[in-house]
């Protein structure tokens, strides 16, 4: 997950209007070379059919406060094998939206191996390392995490996401010395994917906390590896089988997470380190179709 399509850095993503604020300055960028000037001087920016050259990023980290950015038409990206987000978003108090029919075509297939795994690079849909973020009404078709909420994120809500072909709705990977808290995923669908929902902490990581997490009203279908995973043994892109307890996972609710996985998949995989998981509850959870579930914490298996 080193090269997400969209990456939120510090700051806040909010849908707000401020009374008394100066009137928005509107600009439409139709070429990649117009974008930085629009970002510097406009607070209502339309990005219309932007073609981002290979090796370049669509950099929206310097938007002014109270800016709205609207993606229109199809945004495309040239291919270069590198590990950087294609779109970088940061700042304070801004809103990003899409005009009807808008598509961000990350050209992911150029990076992927077509086998559902990490491919040449990793290619998350949304990678969020930020505070006070609302992501809603999104459709992601990709081959890595649909949404990955990671280091330092707090108060992040994801609602009405539709994930297809992905690695699921993820917290992590969680490494050392970080806190990820107050994260909620609601009313979402994950289909044709490796995983459904997961919390993954890195084997050997220390001094980190994952707290106050909600997965609610999530429908899974055609999941090929794991329906629900809480794992403290994540290493080199997958479970190593050796959990460690340097990351605390607490106050987590899985509610009304339902659906099906393929027959070779596991419905559930919960592998906590010694004493490092607490207050993780599962209610109205029912994932079926798989074999070989394994849980060392909680009531799922
Ligand atoms: C959490 O983020 C939302 C934006 O999604 C914001 O409206 C809300 O005020 C934030 N809550 C706190 C406690 O900061
Ligand atoms: C969910 O998001 C989709 C776009 O992906 C939108 O068409 C649909 O209306 C949204 N559903 C709700 C209940 O808002
Ligand atoms: C199930 O998902 C896989 C990808 O993991 C996809 O190749 C396959 O076509 C899907 N099957 C159905 C019936 O949609
Ligand atoms: C459970 O989640 C599904 C979506 O997966 C939703 O349609 C259903 O209304 C939810 N049930 C309750 C009791 O909220
Ligand atoms: C368990 O977690 C829930 C939130 O998920 C929280 O409301 C509750 O206070 C926690 N219980 C304890 C005993 O910490």
Image (cartoon, rainbow, N blue to C red):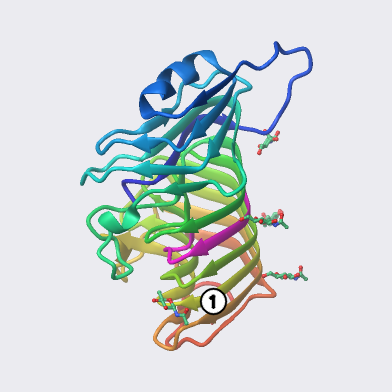
Residue at the right extreme, as displayed: 19
Image position, residue 205 (x, y; %):
34, 50
- Residue at (52, 13) in percent of width and height: 41
Q: Between residues 234 and 167, which one lies in front from this camera angle?
A: 167
Q: Residue at x 77, y 12 (%)?
A: 20
Q: From the viewer's perspective, is 7 left or right of 159?
A: left
Residue 147 seen in the current view: yes
Q: Is residue 300 visible?
A: no
Position of residue 278 measured from the top left corner of the image (x, y, whole percent): 57, 61
| Location of residue 110 (image quadrant) | bottom left
Secondary structure at badge 1 equals strand
Please name the residue that numbered disc 1 is placed on.
221
Q: What's drawn in magenta, residue-wise?
A: 158-170
| Secondary structure mostly taken by the magenta-highlighted segment of the chain | strand
Question: Is residue 161 inside the magenta stretch?
Answer: yes
Give yes or no for residue 222 being in the magenta stretch. Answer: no
């Amino acid at each position: 997950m080193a090269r997400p399509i969209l990456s939120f850095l510090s700051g806040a993503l909010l849908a707000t209007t401020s009374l008394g604020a100066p009137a928005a300055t509107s600009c439409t960028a139709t070429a990649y070379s117009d974008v930085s000037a629009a970002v510097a001087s406009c607070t209502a920016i339309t990005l219309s059919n932007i073609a981002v050259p290979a090796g370049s990023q669509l950099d929206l980290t310097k938007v002014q406060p109270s800016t709205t950015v609207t993606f229109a038409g199809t945004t495309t990206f040239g291919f270069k094998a590198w590990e950087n987000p294609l779109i970088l978003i940061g700042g304070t108090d801004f809103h990003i939206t899409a005009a009807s029919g808008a598509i961000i075509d990350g050209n992911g297939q150029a990076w992927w191996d077509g086998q559902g795994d990490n491919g040449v690079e990793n290619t998350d849909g949304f990678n969020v390392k930020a505070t006070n973020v609302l992501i809603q009404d999104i459709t992601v078709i990709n081959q890595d995490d649909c949404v990955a909420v990671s280091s330092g994120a707090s108060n992040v809500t994801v609602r009405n996401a539709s994930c297809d072909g992905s690695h699921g709705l993820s917290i992590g990977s969680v490494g050392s010395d970080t806190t990820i808290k107050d994260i909620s995923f609601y009313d979402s669908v994950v289909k044709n994917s490796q995983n459904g929902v997961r919390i993954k902490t890195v084997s050997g990581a220390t001094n980190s906390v994952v707290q106050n997490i909600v997965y609610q009203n999530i429908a899974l279908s055609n999941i090929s590896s794991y329906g629900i995973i809480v794992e403290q043994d994540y290493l080199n892109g997958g479970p190593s089988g050796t959990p460690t307890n340097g990351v605390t996972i607490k106050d987590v609710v899985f509610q009304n997470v339902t659906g099906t996985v393929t027959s070779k998949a596991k419905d559930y995989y919960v592998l906590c380190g010694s004493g490092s998981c607490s207050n993780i509850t599962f209610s109205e959870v029912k994932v079926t179709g798989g074999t070989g579930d394994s849980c060392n914490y909680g009531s799922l298996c």
